[in-house]
Amino acid sequence: MVTDLADFAAKRSAEKSPVSGGNPPSPTLSFEQWVDHQNHQPPSPDLFSDAAVDEEFWTSHQYNPAEADTIPVVQTPPTQYRPSPLDLSNVWHSKRRQLFSPEPSITDNNKLWTFVYRGQPPRFERGTRANCLYVDHGDHYHFVFECCPQNKTRTIQRLIESGNLDRRQSMSIMATVQPVINWNHFAAYLVRAAQTPIICIGKKLEHLRDDLYMVPRERKDCATLLRDDRGSKQKHNNINRKRRRELMKGLIEAYDARSYNEFYMAMSCDDRDDIYDEYGPQWKETAEHSINNYIAGMLSKQLAMRFEEILMTNYHNRQCQHPAHTLEGEHWLDQLMAANKINKQQFLTDLTLVMNKVCTRKNAFVIEGPTTTGKTLFVKLIAENYIYGTVQRSGDHSQFFLMNLLNKALALMEEPRITQLTVNDFKELLGGNPFDIHVKHQKDERLQRLPVLITTNNNLVYYVLDPDGKAILERCFYYKFLIKVGSEELPEPPCHLCTCHFRNWYFKNI
């Protein structure tokens, strides 16, 4: 009875065994017999082939729940007969790399990098997976490697570990890392001071090593190459900047521009487009610099020339009509002098003394008279030859009223208001003495002597006391225009008068 129960229990446990599935393992079954009995086919090494398993095997061995109990279960072979499993990992990874290769966008992101290493000689082990170039320059090594910017630090750490580099140089290595912008120039830099053959680790950069062998070897210091390269490039940049500056200077001289707005309005739309294409958004700054230089050059010439020479050089070409005949204009100027009963020879002599800054205490030429008598017309014929500054009428309302005369060759004043607040400044100005003037938002500057032309409707010293007025008048050549233009005594000018008429009239009567 006990024996029967033991046999029954063993039979039930074998039926429920998850290993044998109801069929106890047979230790007498060999591995070859087991494979033949179950029609089992080992997996093909080509894991990605559609014929890895016989098609008949898949169609004839479909799972059927009704036949689950009748399907023979694969029996586990004995341990002593199990063969060593096949190592298919390398095959699987190679197939995976072929099918799932990196995208071109990822590989194209790789860049060449370089760093300087100062330490013990590198010792890369055989079979290392590192890829780099290094060149011995005596007291340091230049390493070149390729990676994407995100993996730069990790790649450097791998090179330090695989090359047995001195870890104490890690900070100096990271401080010298920089991208290789131009491989041809950098290759020449590497070869010129190389003391040993170029060492290539791995096969990834072999094409760069071949390039290095083609570079001619020249004995130059590492810093010399970069210094010479920077010098040649700087010279080239200087030539380009000078050419562009000369182009802007030529345009300003052609338009005779004295300010940025005048230059901008004188140019055509095509000229503006060409200048923008050549200079970019900074063309306004370049134009202002060239205009200031142009004015400074003219100013230095005018300050060194006499009045007669300035009239002959024709500095007024901006608004001049260049008339072929000036006799009519000269005749009208004779009528202007005759109608106002002025000796034109003495008039021009006094004007010349002021313009040439000859007199010691007289530095102003004043024309007084009612409106429309030709005062402004006459002084403009003189002032157009000069770089001149104007003075506002209500000078006593501001302490900066003389600021506009700085860096000018002539002062032109229309209706100046000389009061007790400004009389001392006018004494210095009209007497030709250099003195300090107030400049807005800057420190005071010295105003040098410059000729002064004044036109006024009323008495020039009307608002000052008699002693001060007398001192002002002693510093001026004073003339009066009393006859109005367009009257019977003085007709309208026969043409548009310009400095050409005044120049010819001046040299005929001086």
Image: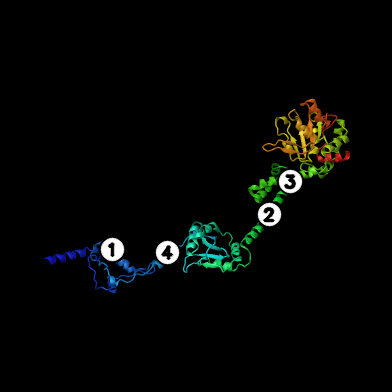
Q: Are marks 3 and 4 in contact (CB under 8 Å)?
A: no
Q: Quadrant of the N terminus?
A: bottom left
Task: Decide if residue 308 is on the left or right side of residue 72.
Answer: right
- The residue that mark 4 highlights is 96
Q: Is residue 19 visible?
A: yes
Q: CA distance from mark 1 to mark 3?
A: 99 Å
Q: CA distance from mark 2 to mark 4?
A: 56 Å
Q: Locate residue 387, reporting x and y percent.
A: 76, 41
Numbered circles on residues, count: 4
- The residue that mark 3 highlights is 294
Task: Decide if residue 101 is on the left or right side of residue 195.
Answer: left
Q: CA distance from mark 2 to mark 3?
A: 21 Å
Mark 1 neighbour density, 10 Å: few (under 14) some (14–19) many (20 or more): few
Mark 3 neighbour density, 10 Å: few (under 14) some (14–19) many (20 or more): some
- Color style of the picture: rainbow
Q: Locate residue 419, reporting x and y percent.
A: 75, 28
Mark 4 neighbour density, 10 Å: few (under 14) some (14–19) many (20 or more): few
**Quick one: 51 or 407, which is closer to the camera?**
407
Amino acid, disc 4: Arg
> Which mark lies nearer to you, 1 or 4?
4
Q: At x 66% / y 47%, what residue is drawn?
A: 283
Q: Name above or below for residue 116 compared with residue 404.
A: below
> Element type at marker 3?
helix
Amino acid, disc 2: Asn
In which image quadrant can residue 261 be found?
top right
Question: Mark 4 or mark 1, which is nearer the start of the sequence?
Answer: 1
In which image quadrant can residue 178 be found?
bottom right
- The residue that mark 1 highlights is 63
